[in-house]
Amino acid sequence: MSIYLTGLLWVGGAAVVAAVMAYLIRKYGELEGRSANNEAAGQVFTIVGGLHAVLVAFVLIALFDAVNQASDAAYREADGLVAATWASDTLGGGAGAEVRELSRAYAETVIDDEWPGMVAGTSFESSGWSQLDQLRRVVAEAPADDEWQADRKSEAANQLWQVYQARQERLDAAGGGVSSVVWFVLIAGSVLAIGLPLLFGGPRIRTHVLIVATLAATITLLLYATYQLQNPFGGGAGVSPDAFEAAVERFG
């Protein structure tokens, strides 16, 4: 099912449930003193709703940054791999060809073995670290017959170090997400923020029901966005392995 259709069902369902609750409470609840509750309940709602809005905004901003950082790390890793391969092409002893083959194998490992696990948010087995270490050894043991080859060898080693750092950032991003404590606070705050307006009173029941339903739909939409963005490689974020697929093409 499409994430947009799923989100629409969640948002619409929350709005309907909140609207039904608001209608039943206004229709069959105690009417005496309800209008007088507006001032007291409104003050509490201002505090609860304000704190909840700040928390949701903080979480969403952090998740947006995490998605951008994960995408940047993937591109830095792939670009560093290509740069290391190009720098190694001039090395002697067949090192350049070996580095190119190992780089292609590493990129294919990332695409075929690691990316599905990152999308699913599950642990996976991969030979990526051993392949990267083998690349490092080939570059380190490659002969450098002149100053130009020595410079290219140093450049390849530096690029491989960038690949190592970017790989670690990518794997860390795949293992991140929103903790259970934060989810508890988000859900509890949402229930409180929706529940307080149910205490309000007013002359028009339809207007009250519409206000509560709109509030519930908005909060549910934000929670759904949080859920979709907590894994940069899956859900609504969906960082793709395009950088590594392009690297494989560059390796010929």
Image (cartoon, helix red, strand yellow):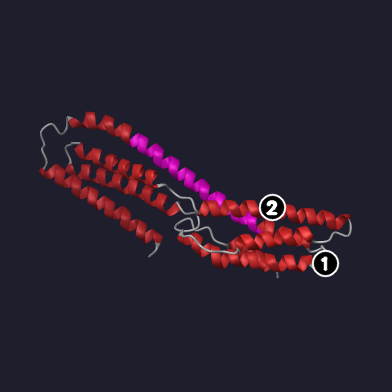
Residue at horizontal 24 percent and vertical 38 percent from the top: 196
- Give coordinates of residue 158: x percent, y percent: 73, 52
Residue at horizontal 86 percent and vertical 56 percent from the top: 148
Q: Is residue 87 visible?
A: no
Q: Vertically, is 37 above or below 118?
A: above
Identify the image quadrant of the N terminus: bottom left
Residue in front for this viewpoint, 66 or 95: 95
Q: Amino acid at mark 2?
A: Trp
Quadrant of the image occupied by residue 99: bottom right
Q: Earlier in the sequence, mark 1 or mark 2?
A: 1
- Give coordinates of residue 210: x percent, y percent: 24, 46
Q: Is residue 178 visible?
A: yes
Residue 161 is labelled as: 2
User: What's the magenta region?
Assistant: 49-78
Query: Left of 241 or right of it: where is 44?
Result: left
- Give coordinates of residue 110: x percent, y percent: 58, 63
Residue at horizontal 54 percent and vertical 61 percent from the top: 240
